[in-house]
Amino acid sequence: MKRNSRLSLALHTLGHMAGDPERVQTSADIAEHAGTNPVVVRRVLGKLRKAGLLTSEKGHAGGWRLARAPGQITLADVYLALDESLVATGEAEAIPACSVEHILQRKVASVLKDVEQSLVERLSATTIAEVRESNDMNAG
């Protein structure tokens, strides 16, 4: 499975923010810590803001902060906010002329839809706070 860097960036950032939820963090600080470009950070965090997971403040003391408590943000919330899929959709560009191929494509698409739903359900079972708590226990 190809690693989704936007999802990794989002989860990494929220995991750090969960350690100090009231602290405002700039895109530049997040980008430096994550080893990426601030423009990439702003695009990803903008999607999280649109989904109600983050707030942003403009100006000299501005930046990003959690919009909800870390215990109220699930990994599924983050995954769905990015509007991407880790599971190939299996959608065909055109209906194949071969009936066997057509049936196979429909069946595979149905299985992949079930896999995607299962993934979201599993991600819903874990919050950012739980990830942070696991990290704190492992560090000590």
Image (cartoon, rainbow, N blue to C red):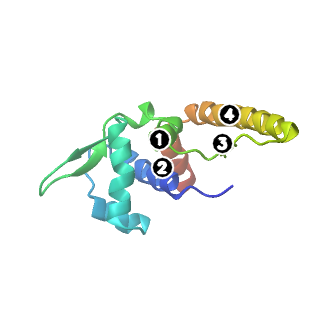
Q: Is residue 135 left or right of residue 21?
A: right
Mark pair 3, 2: CA separation: 23 Å
Vertical arrangement, residue 63 with respect to residue 115, above or below: below
Mark pair 2, 4: CA separation: 23 Å
Q: Earlier in the sequence, mark 4 or mark 1?
A: 1
Q: Earlier in the sequence, mark 4 or mark 3?
A: 3
Mark pair 4, 1: CA separation: 19 Å
Q: Residue furthest left?
A: 60
Residue 29 drawn at (x, y percent): 30, 63
Mark pair 2, 1: CA separation: 7 Å
**Label 2 with label 4: CB-CB less than 8 Å:** no
Of badges 4 and 1, the one in the foreground is 4
Taking the spot 36% from the left edge, 68% from the top edge, the residue there is 32
Q: Earlier in the sequence, mark 2 or mark 4?
A: 2
Element marked by disc 2: helix
Which residue position holds label 2?
11
Which residue position holds label 4?
113
Q: Residue furthest right?
A: 100
Q: Is residue 132 left or right of residue 111?
A: left
Q: Earlier in the sequence, mark 2 or mark 1?
A: 2
**Label 2 with label 1: CB-CB less than 8 Å:** yes
Element marked by disc 1: helix
Quadrant location, the N terminus:
bottom right
Which residue position holds label 1?
78
Residue 104 drawn at (x, y percent): 83, 38
Of badges 2 and 1, the one in the foreground is 1
